[in-house]
Amino acid sequence: MTSANLLTDNPELYEARFPDPERLAARWTEDCLRRHGAGPRVLDLGCGTGRDAAALHRSGRTVTGADLSETMLAHARTRHPGPMYVRADLHGFDLGRDTFDAVVCLDSSLLYCHTNDQLDGFLASCRRALTPGGLLVAEMRNGAYFLGRTDLLDRPAVNEFVWQGTAYRSDTTLTVDRTAQLLRRTRVWTTDDGPPPVEQHSAWRLLLPQETRHFLAAHDFEVLELHDGPGPRTEPLWRQGELPGTATDGDRLHVVARLNTH
Ligand SMILES: C[S@@+](CC[C@H](N)C(=O)[O-])C[C@H]1O[C@@H](n2cnc3c(N)ncnc32)[C@H](O)[C@@H]1O
């Protein structure tokens, strides 16, 4: 049996598999927004279950959460109310001109832009949606981590957990597609309650730090921060008050960029 994306189809399972009880991702985002004086209107693009959008909303922001998945949006509206939730495609969206003071894109959502055209579409859409001086905040895998390192590629990663009385096991294999510059993931889910294994395929753009700078500059963004941590998914985790580093060597990449004002 295959599924496009078991976790996207099962938002509750996604939250169980990737718990963030202290809302670290949202707190880290809020810290970036404050440090650079962002206004209140925030678009969380690739908002998934809505938990970060809702946490930012509770911090006093006026948040719109956007995702391609209707299942995720339905979950977000009922489980994480507060923000407005809309369907939009990262590759090209139109939510009005000068509508937001910041666009945030967490947990590698931006890397669903696989091609250069999709990245251009994303940044052109952000530029239209942002007010001059508005911020783009992104947190994602770092493509540069895979240059000369194979530790994440050598063997399947096995994860086991129990959710609502069912034991889940996932076997995740990552491969590098050098031609497409993608990290491809195959994940096989097995449960102890009978159904056959589910195989899920996904891929992320292997975006490199210097090409990230190039794309941002080409779309009139000034890079304010580009670093590998500390962040909400780094080891060690970001702690409130910690300032960003300057290296881009680790497995996560954090970007804060400002749309030029001229
Ligand atoms: C890894 S989840 C991250 C969710 C959330 N930002 C978080 O940190 O928990 C990626 C999300 O991106 C969404 N997504 C994938 N492709 C997309 C696209 N082309 N446009 C908008 N959302 C997309 C998926 O539906 C999913 O909810």
Image (cartoon, rainbow, N blue to C red):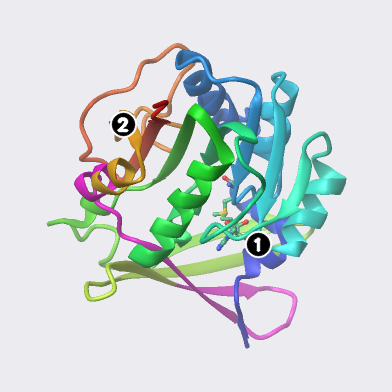
- Label 1 close to label 2 by CB (< 8 Å): no
Seen at 38% across and 65% down, the residue is 117
Q: Percent x, y for residue 253?
A: 34, 41
Ligand 1 is found in the corner quadrant, namely bottom right
56 or 215: nearer the viewer = 215
Q: Which mark is residue 223?
A: 2
Question: Is the distance from the Cβ of mark 1 to the nearest ligand 1 atom less than 8 Å?
Answer: yes
Question: Considering only vertical position in the picture, is 133 above or below 9?
Answer: above
Question: Is the distance from the Cβ of mark 2 to the nearest ligand 1 atom less than 8 Å?
Answer: no
Q: What stretch is highlighted in magenta?
A: 186-213
Quarter-of-image position of residue 5: bottom right
Circle 1 residue: 68
Seen at 30% across and 35% down, the residue is 228
Residue 249 counted in the magenta span: no
Q: Is 252 situated left or right of 30 in this image?
A: left
Q: Which of marks 1 and 2 is nearer the N terminus?
A: 1
Question: Considering only vertical position in the picture, is 133 above or below 113?
Answer: above
How many neighbours does mark 1 have within 10 angstroms: few (below 14), some (14-19), or many (20 or more)? some
Residue 212 counted in the magenta span: yes
Q: Percent x, y for residue 83?
A: 77, 36
Q: Residue furthest left?
A: 148
Q: What residue type is labelled 2?
A: Val
Residue 147 in view of the camera: yes
Seen at 42% across and 29% down, the residue is 237
